[in-house]
Amino acid sequence: MGGVDKGLLPLGQGTVLSLLIARLGPQAGALALNANGAPDRFVGSGLPDVPVLPDAQRGEDGALLGPLAGVLTAMTWAEGQGADAVLTVAADTPFLPADLVAGLRASARPGAPCLAQSASGRHPTCGLWPVMLRPALETALQSGTRRLGHWAQEQNATWAQFEGMAPDPFFNINTPEDLRQAQVWAGS
């Protein structure tokens, strides 16, 4: 999509992110957005007042470390909020299930991540992460681990099944064609 902030793309009566936040708001406690770069780009976008958190950890050369660094940032923030777990989702998945948190919690094991799976496959960016795993994740990132699903499996992750929903609740917007399809589903 040419490096655009996919969450700020128009969808329905707002943006991809505003639809996502409306879907997650009733299911989650406090919300935050993990995004690198200038946070002021979200000002005036119609989003509620949520903190914009840059990655808490970067490579030695300042390089971004990918989605795992975003999970670490979320864990650190959630721990500061007094939460025992944090929900992460990709900013380009506006049709998440209305029972996402309940489904993840129902399939979770104590002390292990629980990630989403649907008919289209596994979705490791969408998961419930115990904040007690933060030190282990910090160590993994420092030692070069970058693959989200791989690290989750090392932590004995479970996979919550979300089947029989249309459109696929984990559909993500990666191309202009995907955006057009999402606009049809959102009634834009």
Image (cartoon, rainbow, N blue to C red):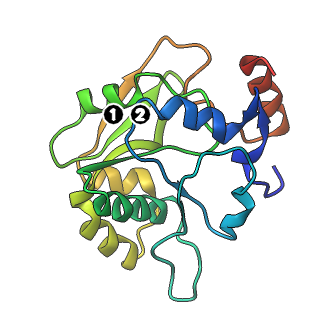
Above or below: residue 131 compared with residue 113: below
Q: Nearer the viewer, residue 3 or 50?
A: 50
The amino acid beneath tag 1 is Trp
Which residue is pictured at 73% across the width and 42% down the height? 174
Q: Residue furthest bottom?
A: 61
> In the image, 141: left or right of 177?
left
Q: Whole-percent x and y of residue 86?
A: 35, 49
Q: CA distance from mark 2 to mark 1?
A: 6 Å
Which residue is pictured at 28% across the width and 44% down the height? 157
What residue would you read off at disc 1?
159
**Which dot marks residue 116?**
2
**Which circle's residue, 2 or 1, is located before the other in the chain?**
2
> Which class describes the residues within 10 Å of circle 2: few (<14), some (14-19), or many (20+)?
many
**Which dot marks residue 130?**
none
Callout 1: SS:
strand
Above or below: residue 112 compared with residue 136: above
